[in-house]
Image: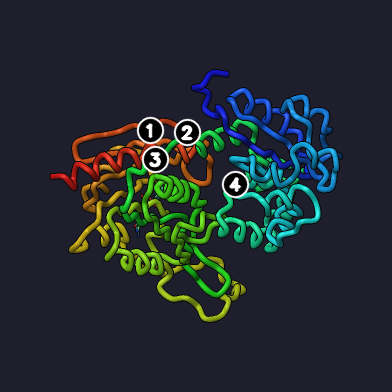
Amino acid sequence: MSVSSPLAGKKILLGIAGGIAAYKCVELTRRLTEFGADVRVVMTTSAKSFITPLTMQAVSGHAVADDLLDPNAQSGMGHIELAKWADLILLAPATANLIARLRAGFADELLTTLCLASPAPIAVSPAMNMEMYLASATQENIAVLAQRGMHIWGPGEGPQACGDIGPGRMLEAHQLVDLVVDFFAPQKAIFKNVNITITAGPTQEALDPVRYISNHSSGKMGFALAEVAQKMGANVTLITGPVALTCAANINRIDIKSALDMHAASLQTLDHCDIFIACAAVADYRPEVIAQEKMKKQSGVENLTLHLVKNPDIIADVANHLDRPFCVGFAAETENVEAYALDKLQRKNLDLIAANDVAKADQGFNSEKNALTVFAAKQRFDITLADKKKVAQQLLEVIHQQYSTTNND
Ligand code: PMT
């Protein structure tokens, strides 16, 4: 290890709960220690059914703590010392049970007691069956932990141990290590005292009380921008359509459903908005009439025509406001990416536009990664394919550079 190791001297308490993903903690601990971190491991009783304390002791180089009332442990590093020692508590895998117990504030075993007793930031990496993850109790518990300031890292999506396919997989070891490195990376507060409004996610345009028109935006790109902008010192307002994501309590989150709601909420932020970033995938049209009752299928009617009317263009209205903020749009294109993006830059009166080619696999809508080409009137910047947080970081650096130039003119 060299002093330039990204995690040199960082003290990480890894809390392992009882889930099949516990096996990933061997690789996780190995990588964290290779990057210079000092890792101490705490395991719940059920975690030991999935991985042995001896294995975790071997990879971390320290005895594993697992008992709240262990007299030997208390004479060495007891739970209060461990709680004070940590720079970061990383809970991985965080099972539905652990998350519920954290929310309720249990202190009847070592791991939850440590979390209660520690002033250290806590990162929670959920891992469970997709139905358990999507259950409203779990979603509510995770939202409460996020509101309390805990970092929610993941889960990923894909095939699960039980055979289901969906959200609930613990992030891979290398993804968690990247998040830990980002977490400790010194972040210059380049947006101190700057108010940034970000739109994110899809809009839902109701047809009747049970149906709507929408799109595949997950909100991940917009939420990544919000999180990184906030870390860069900005006061962030995040106006989001319906998504299954949480954000830190110090982000001013406004939940909306339709384009009209998003339009109204966006205009309301303009009296204190310096930079407006429109990352949302807004429906261009909405049903002209929303049926009061569920529309019934009519026998003999094979075709149905819906009358749609145009939604207001939110970013264009913001950009044409008398006291306009610095305006950044996105362009989601499947062909002629550059030409369409430049057309939107000009037509919507924007300062910057970030174009993504959403026809490419593994980027854009509902993926973990993205790649952008950012256009200003006379300049372009390429941001290559990377995790959405890294893309957000680079895009915000470009925005900062352009915004500062505009403001100093
Ligand atoms: O949410 P994710 O799954 O992470 O996916 C991210 C993303 C692909 C949705 C995002 O990167 C992106 O490209 N967002 C813009 C999608 C879009 O609707 O693009 P557009 O080309 O249709 O719209 C151009 C710009 O006008 C966008 O900034 C859009 O927010 C804005 N717009 C569009 C219509 C409208 N009525 N009002 C608007 O403000």
**Is residue 103 among the parts visible in the rendering?**
yes
Q: Please state the horizontal and vertical placement of residue 38, each as a whole percent of the image.
A: 64, 30
Q: Residue placed farthest to the left in the image? A: 409
Q: Are marks 4 and 3 in contact (CB under 8 Å)?
A: no
Q: Are marks 2 and 4 in contact (CB under 8 Å)?
A: no
Indicate if the residue with disc 3 has its beta carbon within 8 Å of ligand 1: yes
Mark 4 and mark 1 lie on one chain; the one further toward the N terminus is 4
- Spatial CA distance of label 2 from label 4 is 29 Å
Residue 34 shown left or right of residue 104 in the figure: left
Give me the residue at 54% from left, 18% from top. 2
Reading the image, the residue beneath label 4 is: 120
Mark 3 and mark 1 lie on one chain; the one further toward the N terminus is 3
Q: Are marks 4 and 1 in contact (CB under 8 Å)?
A: no
User: Dot 4, how many residues are within 10 Å of its Cα: few (below 14), some (14-19), or many (20+)?
Assistant: some
Q: Amino acid at mark 1?
A: Ile
Residue 142: quarter of image: bottom right
Secondary structure beneath label 3? strand
Residue 73 numbered mark, or none: none
**Is residue 363 among the parts visible in the rendering?**
no
Reading the image, the residue beneath label 2 is: 386
Q: Amino acid at mark 4?
A: Ala
Nearer-the-camera pick, 19 or 220: 19
Q: Amino acid at mark 3?
A: Asn
- Spatial CA distance of label 4 from label 1 is 34 Å
- Spatial CA distance of label 3 from label 2 is 12 Å
Reading the image, the residue beneath label 1 is: 383
Reading the image, the residue beneath label 3 is: 356
Point out the frontmost of discs 3 and 2. 2
- Spatial CA distance of label 1 from label 2 is 8 Å
Point out the frontmost of discs 4 and 1. 4
Residue 237: quarter of image: bottom left
